[in-house]
Image: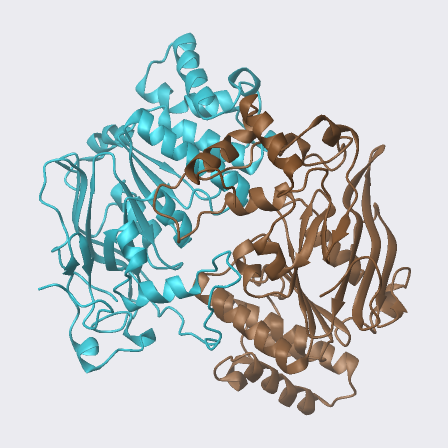
Chain colours: A cyan, B brown
Amino acid sequence: MAGSGTAHLRDEDDMMIRVENLTVQFPAKGSNVVHAVSGISFDVRCGETLGLVGESGCGKSTTGKALLQLPPPTGGSVQLDGEELTQLSRPEMTARRTDIQMIFQDPISSLNPRRTIGKIVAEPLDVWGPTARDEQWALVASILDAVGIDPEDAKYKRPHEYSGGQCQRISIARALVMEPKVIICDEPVSALDVSVQAQILNMLEDLKAKHGLTLVFIAHDLAVVKNISDRVAVMYLGKMCEISDSDDLYAKPAHPYTQLLMDSHPEPNPDAVIDDTVILGGEIPSPIFPPSGCRFRTRCESADDRCANEEPKMSMISDGHYVACHHPLVEPVS
Amino acid sequence: MSSSAASDSRALLSVRELRTHFNVGDHAVKAVDGVSFDVQEGKTLGIVGESGCGKTVLSRSIMGITTASNASTSGSVTYCGTELAGKSKRELRKFWGEEMAMVFQDPMTSLNPVVRIGRQLTEHLRAHKDLSKSEANDLAVQLLTWVRIPEPKERLSNFPHQMSGGMRQRVCIAIALACSPNLLFADEPTTALDVTVQHQILNLLAQQQQERQMGMVLVTHDLGVVATRTDDIAVMYAGKFVEKASTSALFSGMRHPYTQSLFWSIPKTSEPKHTRLSAIVGRPPNLAALPPGCSFADRCPYVQPICREVEPELQTIDSHSFACHLPVGSSDAEAALSANISAGLPQSKGAAARREAHQGTLT
């Protein structure tokens, strides 16, 4: 569903990220426009982890990249630690990017196969210093060590000599070397095996505590997102459906889309009741011609005329739990 | 319930001591190393394991489609009493499609991108059955209806790129079901798909299986997928089955430390946020240079000297098979774990934290 509104934003001083009415559009064939992200708002407190979850094509990666102004959003505001990023000039933004780093989904293709690990992790330092080789190496070695890669061994090795999990550790080291305030993790564990996934998730939690990081964690796996996030935002077709403390969200999903995602999630529990009637679900509509009103209405069981005509706004269900739906599954406290 | 010890007369498929080794230089990569199991009519066997454990090579070896020239396969694969091992491609072709079929992981690459869906569906229909072009077309429409593709007639003239991932996987399933096979291999059929679509595809497979009384082998890395969709589960590690039991028996009492570790390392929505995951330390062993003894020893929280010396045999107690010297739940295993925890063994840290959090119980 798609909803807009800013009721869920918290007006407190310790917000690291504050995004308001973020819109990202891309030109499409003819004079059409792809509505990748349409007016979403959220904030992330210092030291907090926000999980962004949704199906492919819901705009969660685009949102992550828009925070970094890659590309600059079509509209809306992105504040990092009180500073408005959308108004910065290119060189100013380049300087600010040291504070906000990104980890990508495919750990192997996000590392240059022709460079050594030592060079890959040191590259940000060539730009921002220190540039002295021995100083650089001391820093790189300490960070590689922190992510569980043997620095002496890695210095002259190249990415193909490492497994997927190790490459993801190296990507994390490269992001950490700038001592960022925020790391945007775009599906960092979805290409990894479960045993390695657990190692990386534990390590992210440790690094977050040690370096005082703020994380934006983008993923499609509900259990992974719940495990690592303090708050979770559910996105659908460029809109935000629901945002809440993660325990609260999983205990009492208020949005029909959140419920659908949870019903589809396979829990490793043989006694779990599965709804085996769903064989053909709706598919996500085209973001070029999104449905009017609530964007989820084409797949929603409780959709009615109101959903087609009026876009739902974010409203409070309980303390810190907001949903954009005309027919929420949990009655709001008024 | 299948048992690996004695061949069941009703078994649709019996695999005995199947080995597929790839010869690389002067050593062999033992991708599948002595695997035995049965699949019964109308039942589903789940094969679970991490990447590189040999689960895909296993299903391809059974189908007889390991194409690598350096592969050598031995062992027996019996389908309804007929031995398939050693048959030529030409002979096997009679079995493919009509008797056993396969759905592959990646619906983006398992369809031919430059051939219309209609032709990809009818091509083998016409090869297997004596059908005219229009009869084959009618059947293709029928197949697309079965797999719940809306507007099936119009879809026949589509190219794969005009369909979404979920739709393409439905087409792959339709192709696999076209000649009404009795046995279906589904190799990670939903890994590339969104959870909502995964749910639908698994429902579709279950429904088709029930209607046709097909046997099914569901290969996946996701314990969540097999938990509610299978009758039996086999857990594979480094080319071998390390545990095999009925789904309910497996989840109510895991005996192999690998199965247990795998289960613990999965985040669960039923646990509160920031629950510390018990990761499995290290990586799976190199299949070309397997250590002596148990191949899980280096990562096992229960490891004892015997595990590094003697390879455990698969033993069966009450139709629950496991290959471990110190099966989980035994008093020996508890003692070994306590000793490892007090010795500060790195691989026992996760288990130690878990024991503390759950006040002594490890389940």
> In front: A292, or A114?
A292
> In front: B170, or A227?
A227
Q: Quadrant of the N terminus of chain A?
A: bottom left
Q: Quadrant of residue A303?
A: bottom left
From where the camera sits, is residue B302 visible?
yes
Q: Is residue B153 above or below residue B347?
A: below
Q: Is residue B203 above or below residue B251?
A: below
User: In the rendering, at what x and y percent does residue B186 appear?
Assistant: 65, 64
User: In the rendering, at what x and y percent does residue A177 appear?
Assistant: 37, 23
User: In the rendering, at what x and y percent does residue A260 appear?
Assistant: 36, 67
Which residue is depicted at the point 55% across and 44% down?
A193
Q: How many marks?
A: 0
**Could you tell whether B92 is left or right of A254 in the image?**
right
From where the camera sits, is residue A112 visible?
no
Q: Residue furthest front?
A: B331
Which residue is depicted at the point 88% across and 60% down?
B85
Which residue is depicted at the point 53% across and 36% down?
A165
Q: Quadrant of the C terminus of chain A?
A: bottom left
User: In the rendering, at what x and y percent does residue A230 appear?
Assistant: 28, 44
Q: Is residue B169 above or below residue B257?
A: below
Which residue is depicted at the point 82% across and 70% down?
B93
**Could you tell whether A147 is left or right of B302 in the image?**
left
**Could you tell whether A261 is left or right of B299 in the image?**
left
